[in-house]
Every structure is written in structure tokens, then in C-alpha cells.
Amino acid sequence: MREVTVVCGLLLLAACGQQESGGQGRSDGPATTLTIEVVADEDAEPTTMTLTCDPVGGDHPRARAACDALATAGPDVFEPVPVDQACTMIYGGPQQATIVGTLDGEDVDASFSRENGCEMARWDALGTEVFDLPLQ
């Protein structure tokens, strides 16, 4: 009887780690799906791109490089600059961007600019690869 109890317990443990497709848990879609909107200048119309990673796709013109840049930058780049953060008051340009969607399965909704040193550092962490916008 004891052997039956042990075997049943092992079978239950093995079953706990499995999940059928269509159930809850990780979906079959990409873990990273982003909409990136970039405004190159104050009077410019926004450019909108979609990007997926794992698998790489979307209409982003440099999707592979953009996914690599996201992986290198890490999720902290999506955190806003703290209000009490001292930043150099160096203006980097009128460029602005928003990124909305999921990154590695986590929701993101971030705005980027080049209005001071802290914001430029966030922008530069993602760079031309993500924003597809060359800077002077």
C-alpha cells in the first residue's frame, strides 16, 4: 500500500509541471510585442513600427538589431527617470518616442526624449537600433 501511495504522489508531482496548450500559462505568441512610435522633429509626423522578438518579426526595418538592443539594455530602461534624479541640463534634440506593449511577457508603457542627460542616457541605451532614427 505504501508503494502505491508513493507512486501516486510522484505521478501527481509530474503532472503539476505539465500544462496542455490552450490552458493558462505562457502563450504560444512572442514574449515581446512592442509598438514603437517615434517623432523625429517638432513638426514631424510620428513614425509607428511594430516589433516582436522570439520570434523576430513585425514591420520594424531592423528587427533583429532592435531585439538585440532590447536584450542588452534590459527592462530598467523602461523605468522613468526618478523625479529627484539630478540630470545634466544638456539638450540632445527634439526627438521623442513611446514604446507600448510587452517585453519578455511584462507590460511596458514608456516615453523617451532627449531633453536632458538622464533622458539621453535612456534613449542611447536603446539607440538607433530600436528607434530607427539616426542622430547627428
Image (cartoon, rainbow, N blue to C red):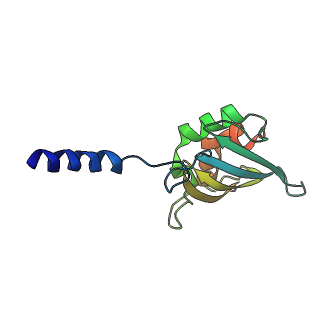
Q: So how many labels did they put on this image?
A: 0
Residue 58: image quadrant is top right
Residue occupying the far bottom of the picture? 83
Q: Looking at the picture, does residue 84 appear above or below residue 35?
A: below
Q: In the drawing, does residue 11 fall left or right of residue 84?
A: left
Q: In the drawing, does residue 131 fall left or right of residue 102?
A: right
Q: Residue at x 71, y 38 (%)?
A: 57
Query: On the rendered image, what quadrant is the C terminus found in?
Result: top right
Residue 96: x percent and y percent? 75, 55
The foreground one among 43 and 78 is 78
Residue 134: x percent and y percent? 78, 37
Residue 3: x percent and y percent? 12, 44
Q: In the drawing, does residue 44 fall left or right of residue 7?
A: right
Residue 119: image quadrant is bottom right
The foreground one among 66 and 81 is 66
Q: Residue at x 50, y 57 (%)?
A: 24
Q: Residue at x 34, y 51 (%)?
A: 16
Whether residue 116 can be seen here: no
Q: Residue at x 60, y 57 (%)?
A: 108
Q: Looking at the picture, does residue 88 appear above or below residue 73?
A: below
Whether residue 79 can be seen here: yes
Residue 54: x percent and y percent? 60, 38
Residue occupying the far left of the picture? 2
